[in-house]
Image: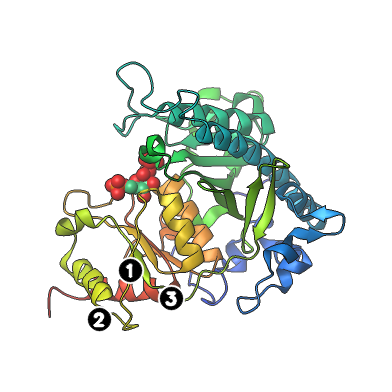
Amino acid sequence: MKVAYALASGAALVGTSDAFVAPAAVRSPLQQQRTSSRPNVVMAATAEKPATSKEAQAVPGGVMTLSRYMLDQARINTDYQDLEQLMGSIQYACKTIANLVSRAGISDLTGLQGDGGSVNVQGEEQKKLDVISNDVLKNALRSSGKLGVIASEEEDTPVLVEEAFNSKFVAVFDPLDGSSNIDAAISTGTIFGIFEETEECIVDDDADMDEASQVCLLNTLQPGGSLVAAGYCMYSSSTILVFTMGDGVNGFTLDPQIGEFVMTHPNIQVPKRGKIYSFNEANSPDWPENLQTYVTDLKNGDGESGEKYSSRYIGSMVGDVHRTLLYGGIFGYPGDINNPNGKLRLLYEGAPMAFICEQAGGMATTGTQRVMDINPEKVHQRVPTYLGSAEDVTELINALKKEKAE
Ligand SMILES: O=P(O)(O)OC[C@H]1O[C@](O)(COP(=O)(O)O)[C@@H](O)[C@@H]1O
């Protein structure tokens, strides 16, 4: 029996120190049974005394691999068994994409897809690796048998997974985020979000398939607050997979020697405040004046902390968010006079990253509301996104409330 549910928009933020926890009333069965499932080492970790990478890795008889971590979760809490299998497919896909990305220049995988290039539904030129990564992830997710519907940046519309009707999950993903950087071998990444399928998507044998598939396709349009898992895999000097299942955030580094993701970043906690801002300032002339003032103040040390901030911007959301989670500060892609909703896509960029950031003790906002509270209307809709340290994001929200120059 599956339970259809939706996150009550406007649910109050509970407890800023630890990651946001949806009020019990609106947590899915999978979300409700989470508290008791972290391995002791990670449980013992605190912001003050986080478990060292060595401690987190060291488990009886070897290292804490992602596979082992998920097996532990599924043993502790049977509701994780389906997610354990799904994460198996996701990590396989990320290892494959990591290998393709690292050999792109060697195996002629740089450059645009097809002769004369091809564009996706958003009019963006597709890189060869955009298309290949999309296929790798789609096939891996399909083979899990756990997915009914998938939505991808590289697919015009959500795709129904015929062979998995009566499945359990919906996956949304950006197979190769920051692909504009791929030919320069600068960090890129895969972003994914997992929702539970809603009741309406259970299809009886004699159901009208077209109607059913329409309903199922709509299943992808769920708010971030309904995510049951989200993560990213960064392809950079190391390949690091960071994810949450709604009870904290853990990071695993791909050890090429054993071909396994090994836990290296247990219980990631984003610092309460940072000293780095990360925006594409080339767009600043088109930004709202109060945002321009906010960034100028950070530069001059005229912000709340009185610290002079530094600027870092890779132009790959995964790279910029990963650094922000570890070092603190604020990353954003604001709306501006030309693009009121900015550039980042809500469903497979904004919402999954917001879930991870909140689970790590940070915040994620559009400037006026939690990114996680937005009910998507379109699969590829964009959303202004600011995320990072709680004190930095709060300062930004207050700055955006300020009227034109006082
Ligand atoms: O070049 P810009 O305009 O600063 O945009 C960079 C942003 O666009 C993105 O590359 C968009 O993602 P895709 O590469 O998946 O289309 C983000 O990763 C990044 O944060």
Identify the image quadrant of the N terminus: top right
> Under tag 1, what secondary structure?
strand
Can residue 85 be seen here? The reply is yes
Label 3, label 1: how far apart the Cα atoms are: 13 Å
Instruction: Name the residue type under label 3.
Output: Arg
- Label 1 within 8 A of ligand 1 by Cβ: no
Instruction: Tell me the tag on residue 302.
Output: 2
Q: Among all residues in the image, which is located at the extreme left? A: 405
**Ligand 1 rendered quadrant:** top left
In the image, residue 330 lies at what x, y percent? Answer: 38, 66
The residue singled out by tag 3 in the image is: 273
Q: Tell me: 146 left or right of 298.
A: right
Mark 1 or mark 2: which comes first in sequence? 2
Dot 3 or dot 1, earlier in sequence: 3
Going 36% across and 25% down the picture, which residue do you hit? 112
Q: Residues within 10 Å of mark 2 (few under 14, many from 20)?
A: some
The residue wearing badge 1 is 310
Which one is closest to the eye, mark 1 or mark 2? 1
Q: Position of residue 260 (x, y in %)?
A: 70, 44
Residue for point 28% across, 57% down: 334
Identify the image's colour scheme: rainbow, by chain, secondary structure or one colour. Answer: rainbow
Which badge, 3 or 2, comes first in the chain's sequence?
Answer: 3
